[in-house]
Each structure stands twice: as structure tokens, then as C-alpha cells.
Amino acid sequence: MILIPLLKKILLGSTFVSMLTALYLVFEWVPVERQMGPVQKIFYFHVPSAWVAFLAFFVVFVASIMYLKTKAEVYDIIAGSSAQVGVVFTAIVLITGPIWGRAAWGTWWTWDPRLTTTLILWFIYLAYLIIRNSAKGNEKNYRLAAVFGIIGFVDVPIVFMAARWWRTIHPVVFEADKIGLPPSMIFTLMVCLLTFTLLYLVLLLQCKTIEQMERKIQNLKREALKAY
């Protein structure tokens, strides 16, 4: 029991150090991109946010399958917590993307396949959260939300592959045989990806802890009502 709080403190400390390192690299160390200028630095927040969103929804996918298989409450809580984080980071992607796109393409928004499928992904998991939050202890509704979370994950590989499958103005950063970036930008991006992954874990654990406490309170209320 003592080990878990210690691990959480280590995770929190590692995230803080990694975040400071990432901010230094982005704003002080890595060179300014010649064509786009300082606005290109949004890239170091945009791409990791997309990665975290994909990771979060993959966790929803796996945890939802485990919940349907085992009916263990903890998997539903993990799925719901991960979806909350994923929706937030998808929103960050949808906000930072147009800012970057305005400088690169001269427009805030275009119904590009990558952008459109990302927006659909955000709506899918927002709907998942609405379904799940309306469950109110009803196991049938939790199962329905789990099924929705599993099916919704289909859009994740579509978002990732959209720039490869269709004609799109969105750049492909990670190609099969190379990464189209200079070494300094690759290193900074890797640090940012690590930082955002650690941040995801911190937020996931926090959301999970909060929901577990909420459920305990709800159970105590039900027991109190039964006693009367």
C-alpha cells in the first residue's frame, strides 16, 4: 500500500521535470523553423496531443473489452477515465491545428480528411462520455457505453491513415522509411511525446481515483437509504 503512493509521487515528479525540459527545448533550444517562424512551435504540442488522444482511446478500447469480458468495475472506471483525458487532448488537437493551419495553409479550417475524421473522433468519445455518465449505476448502460467505446475506436486508425489514404493538405510527419525533420526537431518532439505520455498517466490516475471515490460515496448513500 505504501508503494502505490510512492510510485505516484515518482510519476508526478518525473512529469514535472520532463515538462520543464520540454518547455526549455521548445522555446529556447530547438531552432525556429525558417518558413513558418515561431508559430511552428505549436507542432510540439499538437503532435503529442494527438498521440495522447490515440493512446487514451486505445486504453478505452482495451478496458471496455475487459469490462464486457469480466464485468469488473475497475475496467469501466479506467475506460471512462481514459476517455475523459482523450476528449480533452483531442480538443487540444482541434484547437492547435487551426492555429498552425492558418500560418501554413492560410485558413483556419478546411474539411480535409485528417481534420474531419479527427472532429468525428472527438464527437464519438464525447457521445461515449454522455452515454456513460447517464448510466447512474445501471450496469446495462455501462455495457452499452463499453460497446460504443469499442466501436468508436475504429476511427482512430482512420484518422492516423487519412493523410496517406486520401489527397490531403495535412503533412505526413512519420513516413515508413524516414521522419521528415532535422535531428534537433526530432529530439525535441521525442521529449514532448514522453512528457505528454507521462502527463496522460498522471491525469488518468487522478480521474480514476476521483471516480472510485464518487462510486464509494454513491454506494454509502444507497446503503444508508436501505437502512431507513
Image (spheres, rainbow, N blue to C red):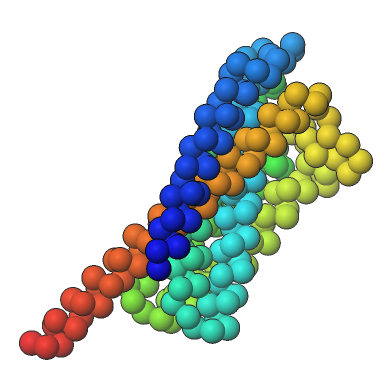
Report the residue at 83% width, 30% height from top: 180
Tell me if 187 is positioned left or right of 72 in this view: right
Tell me if 202 is positioned left or right of 182 in this view: left
The one of 215 and 110 positioned closer to us in this rendering: 215
The one of 5 and 89 positioned closer to us in this rendering: 5
Report the residue at 91% width, 41% height from top: 177
Q: Position of residue 194 (x, y in %)?
A: 63, 42
Residue furthest left as drawn: 228
Quarter of the figure that contains the N terminus: bottom left
Q: State whether residue 176 is above or below residue 39.
A: below
Tell me if 207 is positioned left or right of 109 in this view: left
Q: Position of residue 172 (x, y in %)?
A: 79, 36
- Quadrant in the rendering for residue 167: top right
Q: Position of residue 56 (x, y in %)?
A: 57, 55
Tell me if 205 is positioned left or right of 58 in this view: left
Residue furthest bottom as drawn: 227
